[in-house]
Image: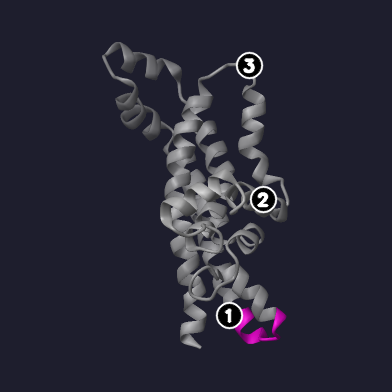
Amino acid sequence: MTIDFWSPIKLSIEIALVSSIVVIILGIFLGKKMSNSKFRGKSILETMFLLPLVLPPSVVGFLLIVIFGRNSPVGRGIEWLFQQPIMFTWWAAVIAAIVVAFPLMYQSAKTGFQGIDKDIEDAARVDGAGKLKLLLLISIPLAAKSIIAGAILSFARALGEFGATLMFAGNIPGKTQTTATAIYIAIDTGNMQLAWAWVGSMIVISFIMLVCVQLVRD
């Protein structure tokens, strides 16, 4: 009972942590870039960034299979490099979590950067601050609330990902079985006691995440 119960939770947290690190880096970089940029096709590019928010999880999973499957150039390249396909692996679950969590981080970071007084950044540039120094010492601290809120929401989204993960990474106990997929299997097999235990744990974790977001924003 103990092993069966904690394994999916531990795996979900590990996947959410790794995917959140990637999402935070990408979200900050692209959020800052897009907040100050004006170019033809920007709205289309941003729509693509946000698309996973509105797409059904099955569609996201299907697209991941098409892009990273064994019949695609990307999939064949990965299989040649690592001597195994990426589908139905731990990394497949991480990729699925990154895709669905990225829009939340991107939108939060972009909103935070857009709220910065540009005179402060201009003054830092006059004082000789380069792009990296400006980002790390001026822009990120001033947009910290939005960035932290986005990071927490992204972690929570990655933690609860189900559809795309099930299609792309599968449901292999101890390897790709997250809490969300474990709940589905527990219900399907009639093990309601175990399902309720996992549901309760996810509610508690999600509640704590939302409380943290509210505290940051306040």
Tell me what residue is drawn at x 51 percent, y 88 percent: 1
Amino acid tagged 1: Ala
| Residue 192 counted in the magenta span | yes
Sequence-first tag of 2 and 1 = 2
Magenta residues span 188-197
Marks 2/1 in contact by CB < 8 Å: the verdict is no
Q: Which residue is mark 3?
A: 40
Which is nearer the eye, 75 or 47? Answer: 75
Amino acid tagged 2: Val
Q: Which residue is mark 2?
A: 60
- Residue 197 is marked as 1
Per the image, label 3 sits on a secondary structure element best described as: loop
- Name the mark nearer the viewer: 1 or 3: 3
Which is nearer the eye, 159 or 60? Answer: 60
- Residue 76 is marked as none
Answer whether residue 155 is visible to the viewer in this image. Answer: yes
Secondary structure mostly seen in the magenta stretch: helix
